[in-house]
Image (cartoon, grey):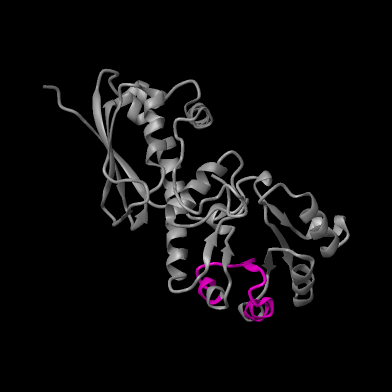
C-alpha cells in the first residue's frame, strides 16, 4: 500500500501482513532485547508446569491497535498459547474493557508481558491520537496525514496504526512519492528548475508536490506545473489566503506545529491535507494492563 502521493494508493484499507518475515524478525529481536539469557525472576519464583490466563484491559478510552502483534509475541515464545481477542483492531473501547485473553504456560505469559504491552500501548496510542485529530476535521474536506518522522524499524507498524485510527499515510518511503522540499530547492536551483526537472523525469502517474513558504513561492510552484503544494509553517490566516490564491489549481497540504489545539482552524482555512508529525513521533502510549491468574487444575 502506497502513501497519498503514490499511484498505488487506493485511499482505502487498513490491512497489514503480520505474518511477514520482517514482523517475525522484529518480534524476535524485541524479545531478545527484553529477555536476554532468560526470565530470571519467573524461573526462580513460578512453577514451570503452571498454566495461567491473562487479560489485557483498557484503563482509559482508546482506539485499539496491535492485537495481532501482541498475539505474535506470545506465539513466538510458545506455539501452544491460546489467544482470544475481545475486540478487533480499530475498535474504540471504554475504560475497563477486556481487549484480549491469552491462556497457556504461566512462564510464557510472564516472559512476553512487557514486549506485548509495549507494542500494544504504543500502537494504540497512535491510533487513538489519529482518531481524535480526525474527529476535529468533521464537516471539512481536510484529510489528516502522517509523516516520515517515525521510529527507525517501526515505520510500517506506526503507519498501520495511523490508518487504524482513521488517518492517511503520507509517503511510506522515499520511493513512494515526489515531494520537493527546501534542501532540494537549494540544490536544484530553485522552484522552477526543480519542478521542471521532476515533471520531465518522474515515473508514470507520479504527482509532483513542492514545499513553499510564501505566497510568491506558491505562485512560482503553480506556474511551474506542480500539482500539489505543501504550505510549511504558515498560520491559518496565511493558509486561507494561499488557498484562495491557488484557486483550485493545486491541492494544498499544510504542516508545521499542528496539533489538537489548532488543527480545526487549518481545516477551516481550506487545506486539503494536514500532515502531523506528532502522530508517530509524539503520540502518548495509552494505559493498558495485563493481569495474569493461575488456572486451577481439574
- Quarter of the image that includes the C terminus: top left
Relative to residue 28, is residue 211 drawn left or right? right
Residue 102, x across and y down, in percent: 28, 33
Quadrant of residue 71 within the rendered picture: top left
In the image, what residue occupies the spot 44% across and 43% down? Answer: 15
Residue range in magenta is 239-265
In the image, what residue occupies the spot 43% across and 63% down? Answer: 132
Residue 182, x across and y down, in percent: 78, 60
Number of marks present in the image shown: 0
Q: Give the answer, above or below, for where 231 lies relative to 296.
A: below
Q: Give the answer, above or below, for where 109 lies relative to 60.
A: above
Task: Pick whichever, 82 or 3, lies toward us.
Answer: 3
In the image, what residue occupies the spot 14% across and 22% down? Answer: 297
Membership of 6 in magenta stretch:
no
Instruction: Say whether residue 203 is visible.
Output: yes
Instruction: Say whether residue 112 is visible.
Output: no
Task: Pick whichever, 48 or 271, lies toward us.
Answer: 271
Q: Give the answer, above or below, for where 143 lies relative to 81.
A: below
Residue 60, x across and y down, in percent: 33, 56
Question: Which residue, as the protein is rendered here, is positioned at the far left?
Answer: 298
Quadrant of residue 262 within the rendered picture: bottom right
Task: Pick whichever, 82 or 181, lies toward us.
Answer: 181
Task: Pick whichever, 34 or 16, lies toward us.
Answer: 16
Membership of 247 in magenta stretch:
yes
Amino acid at each position: 500500500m502506497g502513501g497519498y502521493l503514490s499511484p498505488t494508493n487506493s485511499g482505502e484499507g487498513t490491512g497489514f501482513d503480520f505474518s511477514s518475515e520482517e514482523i517475525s524478525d522484529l518480534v524476535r529481536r524485541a524479545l531478545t532485547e527484553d529477555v536476554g539469557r532468560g526470565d530470571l525472576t519467573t524461573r526462580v519464583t513460578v512453577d514451570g508446569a503452571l498454566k495461567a490466563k491473562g487479560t489485557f484491559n483498557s484503563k482509559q478510552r482508546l482506539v485499539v491497535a496491535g492485537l495481532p502483534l501482541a498475539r505474535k509475541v506470545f506465539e513466538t515464545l510458545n506455539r501452544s498459547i491460546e489467544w482470544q481477542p475481545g475486540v478487533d483492531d480499530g475498535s474504540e473501547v471504554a475504560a475497563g474493557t477486556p481487549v484480549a485473553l491469552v491462556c497457556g504456560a504461566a512462564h510464557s505469559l510472564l516472559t512476553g508481558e512487557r514486549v506485548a504491552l509495549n507494542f500494544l500501548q504504543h500502537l494504540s496510542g497512535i491510533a487513538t491520537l489519529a482518531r481524535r485529530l480526525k474527529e476535529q476535521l468533521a464537516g471539512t474536506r481536510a484529510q489528516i496525514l502522517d509523516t516520515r518522522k517515525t521510529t527507525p524499524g517501526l515505520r510500517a507498524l506506526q503507519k498501520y496504526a495511523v490508518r487504524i485510527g482513521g488517518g492517511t499515510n503520507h509517503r511510506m518511503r522515499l520511493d513512494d512519492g515526489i515531494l520537493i522540499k527546501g534542501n532540494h530547492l537549494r540544490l536544484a536551483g530553485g522552484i522552477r528548475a526543480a519542478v521542471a526537472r521532476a515533471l520531465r523525469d518522474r515515473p508514470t502517474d507520479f504527482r509532483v508536490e513542492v514545499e513553499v513558504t510564501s505566497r510568491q513561492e506558491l505562485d512560482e510552484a503553480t506556474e511551474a506545473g506542480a500539482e500539489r503544494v505543501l504550505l510549511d509553517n504558515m498560520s491559518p490566516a496565511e493558509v486561507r489566503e494561499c488557498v484562495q490564491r491557488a484557486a483550485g489549481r493545486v491541492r494544498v497540504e499544510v504542516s508545521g506545529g499542528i496539533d489538537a489545539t489548532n488543527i480545526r482552524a487549518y481545516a477551516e482555512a481550506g487545506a486539503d491535507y494536514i500532515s502531523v508529525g506528532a502522530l508517530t513521533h509524539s503520540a502518548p502510549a495509552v494505559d493498558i494492563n495485563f493481569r495474569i491468574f493461575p488456572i486451577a487444575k481439574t
